[in-house]
Image (cartoon, helix red, strand yellow):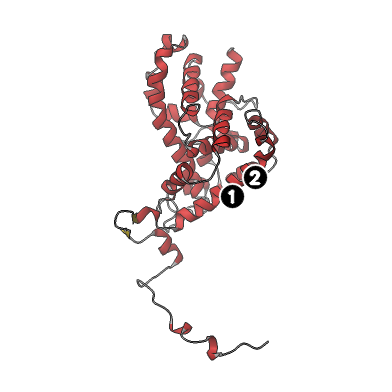
Amino acid sequence: MADRTLARRTFLARIGVLGAATAFGSAIPAALPRTAAAAGSDALLDPLVGLLRPVLAELARDTLSGLVVMTCPGPDRFSHAQGTPRSEPGAIDAGADDFIINALDNFLPFPDQIATPLATALTTALDDTGIPLPPSLHSLLLGQVNTVDRALMVILRNDQTVPLSLVVGLLLNLLATQVNPLSITGSLLSPFARLSIDEKCRAFELLEGPNADLLAVLDSNLPEPLTSSLSGLLQFLAGALLEFSAFGAHNEFAVFDPDTKELTARPVGWELAGYQPDGVVDGWDDFIGYYEDRTEVGA
């Protein structure tokens, strides 16, 4: 049992949950009295679930912030962390993190029969890679780890819709620690956000390619005949994540008022693309009439 709990502690650290819990100060450990936690008291579960939900939401946001800067870096801390800061505004300034969270949770056509087993897989998988944990993550008592683990399962295994942004965040963090075990700890909240741009690209290669270790973990939790299509679904997800990231950095989502149907400010994407530099463009003199005065096209 102790070996399994140690494996669970490593796995929780790899998907970012343990680090996020400890990064939020003493809120999570303080909710777990040592004697009761060690005994695995059910009385602790409900309050911990309430504490863990905002922690997981922030973990997902941190992970996806590290994702969107892959396509459009800027002066933000996530672009600095991946080693590609730029002086002009980027995806974070454009609100691409909010856009992709909204898109994943509400619009991306990823089937529930895949998302739910995927979430289940990310709570039942065990890690056997021997990634060492830093003292800050290793210090939680075994009982505390068990209680955090059970709270995560309650959140992901429920009758409500599972937020795809959280599932994607946990999956990217698992891949991040596969690419670079040292990403398990650092200044940012999530392992994926701590990677360099090259390491993030390697994580996406694992997501798109025949990652035997990942597929073995996920396949065991998928019903037939979905196992045969898992690789293709992960490839679709990988492509969609980068496409949504780029689109989120260059659209009007952050400054569009749905009530008035108007923009409240000039979108960052317009600045980056040089779109409509002098207001509304009615047309250009160069395009009046036919190109180069041509009036017909020969065979």
Splitting the image into 4 quarters, where does residue 179 fall? top right
Q: Amino acid at mark 1?
A: Gly
- What label sits on residue 146 in the rendered view? none
Q: How many marks?
A: 2
- What label sits on residue 239 in the rendered view? 1
User: Who is closer to the viewer here, 22 or 97?
Assistant: 97
Q: Looking at the picture, does residue 130 appear above or below residue 170?
A: above
Residue at (37, 24) in percent of width and height: 27
The reply to whether the C-beta atoms of the residues labelled 2 and 1 are less than 8 Å apart is: yes
Splitting the image into 4 quarters, where does residue 214 fall? top right
- In which quadrant is the C terminus drawn? bottom right
Task: Give coordinates of residue 223: x percent, y percent.
Answer: 64, 30
User: In this figure, which residue is indicated by the disc labeled 2?
Assistant: 208
Q: Looking at the picture, does residue 205 appear above or below residue 8?
A: below
User: Who is closer to the viewer here, 208 or 196?
Assistant: 208
Residue at (37, 53) in percent of width and height: 254
Q: Is residue 106 left or right of residue 221?
A: left
Q: Is residue 102 left or right of residue 71?
A: left
User: Who is closer to the viewer here, 161 or 184?
Assistant: 161
* Neighbours of disc 1 within 10 Å: few (<14), some (14-19), many (20+): some
Q: Is residue 277 left or right of residue 19?
A: left
Q: Looking at the picture, does residue 285 appear above or below residue 217?
A: below
SS at mark 2?
A: helix
Task: Give coordinates of residue 135: x percent, y percent.
Answer: 50, 23
Q: Amino acid at mark 2?
A: Glu
Q: Earlier in the sequence, mark 2 or mark 1?
A: 2
Task: Give coordinates of residue 1: x percent, y percent.
Answer: 59, 12
* Neighbours of disc 2 within 10 Å: few (<14), some (14-19), many (20+): some
